C-alpha cells in the first residue's frame, strides 16, 4: 500500500534548483554533492534569466526520476512556476518536492502544489 | 431477482447458504475494522495538514532570515565573487538525510532525519579567508538551521502524500464492501432462501400429488375388488338367486 522501504532507503541527498543566492546559501549549509567522476553530476542547478525552461525541466526530471539517491528536491517557487505543470503532475512521495521562497520572490502559499492539494481536500 | 447489486453465481443449496452467511459476517467485520482504520488515518492526516500549514509559514520566515545573512556575507566579502567560489568548491555533501519509518495503524510513513557526516572534509574551509570569515560562518549556521526546517517540512509533506494515497485506497475498500459486497451477499442469501422455499413448496406439492394419486389408485382397486367379490359371491348376500325361476342354470360339467 505505502511505498516499500526500498523506495527511500538510499535517498540521502538533497537537490536544489534555484536562483544564485538560494543555491549558494544552501551549498554553504553543506547540501552540495558532486558524484564521482567520470560522470560527475551536481545535485544543484542555478537558474537565472537566461536559463531555458527546457533546461529546468531536464534537471527536474533528472532529480526526480533518474537519480535514486535524492530524498528532497528544493525548488524556488518562481522557478517552479515556470515548470508548474511538471511539478503539479509529480504526485509521488519520493523525492519530496519542496517549494521554497527566494530573496526576490516572497512565499505565496496559493501557488504551492502541495498546499493547493491540501486546500482542495478540505474543499476550500 | 437481482435488485441493484446482482448476486453471486452459486447453486441454491443449504451449503452455499451457510457459506454466504459466514461471508456476510466476515464482510461486516472487515467493514467496521476498515472504517475505524480510515478514521484513525484521517485524524492523523488532518493533524499533518495543519502542521504543514504552520511549517510552511515558518519556512517563509526562516528563509528570509537566511537570505539576509547571505546578503551580509556578500557585503562583507566585497568584490570577490563568493558564489562562484562556493559552487566550485563543492565536492561531497556534509549535510545528508536518513530515512526512518513511523507506523500509523499499519501504514509505514517514511520520515527524513538530517545528520552531518564528519568524514567528508569541509569544502568551504578556506571560503572567506581573506575577509568576512565570521559572516560566512554565521551564514552557514543560519542556513543549516533553515535546511533543518526544510527537512522537517519535507517529512511532513511525504507523510501527507503517502497518507493521502493510503486513505484513498482504504476508503475505496470501505465503500466497495459497503455498497457492493454486502448488498450482493445479502441478495445471494435472499435468492438462496427463496429458491429453497420454492423447492420446499414444490416438494410438498409433489408429495401431495403422489398421495392423492395413491388414494385414487387405492379407491379404484377397492372398487374393483368389491366388484369382483360381488361377482364371485354371486350376490348371495343381498339377493338370493331365483332357483325356481325361469332362467336356466349353467350347465354343470364334471
Image (cartoon, helix red, strand yellow):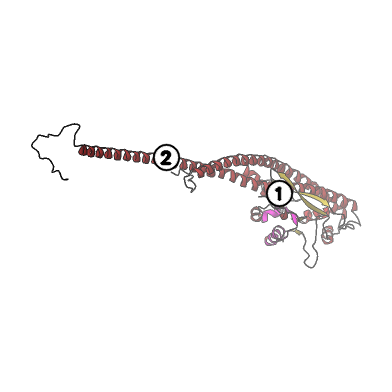
Which of A99 and A102 lies nearest the eye of the viewer?
A99
Q: Residues within 10 Å of mark 1 (few under 14, many from 20)?
A: many
Q: Position of residue B208 (x, y in %)?
A: 35, 38
Q: Chain of mark 1?
A: B
Q: Residue most toward the right?
A: B130
Q: Position of residue A112 (x, y in %)?
A: 68, 48
Instruction: Answer whether labels 2 and 1 touch (C-beta < 8 Å).
Output: no
Secondary element type, mark 2: helix
Residue picked out by circle 2: B200
| Numbered tag placed on residue A42 in the rendering | none
For residue B209, what is the image quadrant?
top left
Q: Position of residue A46 (x, y in %)?
A: 76, 59
Q: Which residues are magenta?
A: A54-82
Which of B90 and B179 lies nearest the eye of the viewer?
B179
Residue A25 in view here: no
As drawn, B56 above or below B130: above
Residue picked out by circle 1: B158
Q: Residue most toward the left?
A: B246
Q: Residues within 10 Å of mark 2 (few under 14, many from 20)?
A: few
Which of A40 and A113 lies nearest the eye of the viewer?
A40
Numbered disc total: 2
Secondary element type, mark 1: helix
Q: Residue most toward the front?
A: B254
Amino acid at each position: 500500500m505505502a511505498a516499500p522501504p526500498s523506495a527511500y532507503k538510499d535517498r540521502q541527498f538533497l537537490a536544489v534548483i534555484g536562483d544564485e543566492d538560494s543555491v549558494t546559501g544552501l551549498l554553504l549549509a553543506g547540501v552540495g554533492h558532486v558524484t564521482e567522476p567520470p560522470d560527475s553530476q551536481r545535485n544543484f542547478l542555478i537558474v537565472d534569466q537566461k536559463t531555458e525552461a527546457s533546461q529546468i525541466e531536464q534537471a527536474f526530471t533528472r532529480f526526480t526520476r533518474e537519480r535514486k539517491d535524492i530524498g528532497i528536491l528544493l525548488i524556488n517557487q518562481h522557478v517552479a512556476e515556470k515548470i508548474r505543470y511538471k511539478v503539479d503532475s509529480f504526485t509521488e512521495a519520493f523525492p519530496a518536492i519542496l517549494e521554497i521562497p527566494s530573496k526576490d520572490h516572497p512565499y505565496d502559499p496559493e501557488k504551492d502544489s502541495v498546499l493547493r492539494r491540501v486546500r482542495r481536500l478540505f474543499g476550500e | 431477482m437481482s435488485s441493484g447489486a446482482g448476486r453471486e453465481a452459486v447453486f441454491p443449496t443449504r451449503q452455499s447458504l451457510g457459506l454466504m452467511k459466514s461471508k456476510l459476517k466476515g464482510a461486516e467485520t472487515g467493514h467496521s475494522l476498515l472504517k475505524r482504520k480510515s478514521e484513525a488515518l484521517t485524524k492523523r492526516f488532518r493533524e499533518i495538514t495543519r502542521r504543514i500549514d504552520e511549517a510552511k509559514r515558518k519556512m517563509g520566515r526562516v528563509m528570509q532570515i537566511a537570505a539576509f545573512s547571505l546578503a551580509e556575507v556578500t557585503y562583507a566579502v566585497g568584490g570577490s565573487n563568493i558564489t562562484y567560489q562556493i559552487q566550485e568548491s563543492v565536492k561531497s555533501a556534509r549535510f545528508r538525510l536518513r530515512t526512518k519509518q513511523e507506523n500509523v495503524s499499519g501504514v509505514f510513513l517514511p520520515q527524513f532525519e538530517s545528520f552531518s557526516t564528519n568524514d567528508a572534509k569541509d569544502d568551504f574551509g578556506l571560503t572567506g579567508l581573506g575577509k568576512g570569515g565570521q559572516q560566512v560562518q554565521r551564514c552557514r549556521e543560519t542556513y543549516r538551521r533553515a535546511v533543518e526546517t526544510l527537512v522537517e517540512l519535507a517529512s511532513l509533506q511525504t507523510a501527507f502524500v503517502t497518507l493521502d494515497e493510503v486513505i484513498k485506497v482504504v476508503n475505496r475498500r470501505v465503500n466497495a464492501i459497503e455498497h457492493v459486497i454486502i448488498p450482493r451477499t445479502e441478495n445471494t442469501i435472499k435468492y438462496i432462501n427463496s429458491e429453497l422455499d420454492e423447492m420446499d413448496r414444490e416438494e410438498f406439492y409433489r408429495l401431495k400429488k403422489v398421495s392423492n394419486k395413491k388414494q385414487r389408485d387405492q379407491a379404484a382397486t377397492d372398487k374393483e375388488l368389491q366388484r369382483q367379490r360381488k361377482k364371485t359371491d354371486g350376490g348371495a348376500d343381498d339377493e338370493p338367486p331365483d332357483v325356481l325361476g325361469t332362467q336356466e342354470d349353467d350347465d354343470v360339467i364334471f
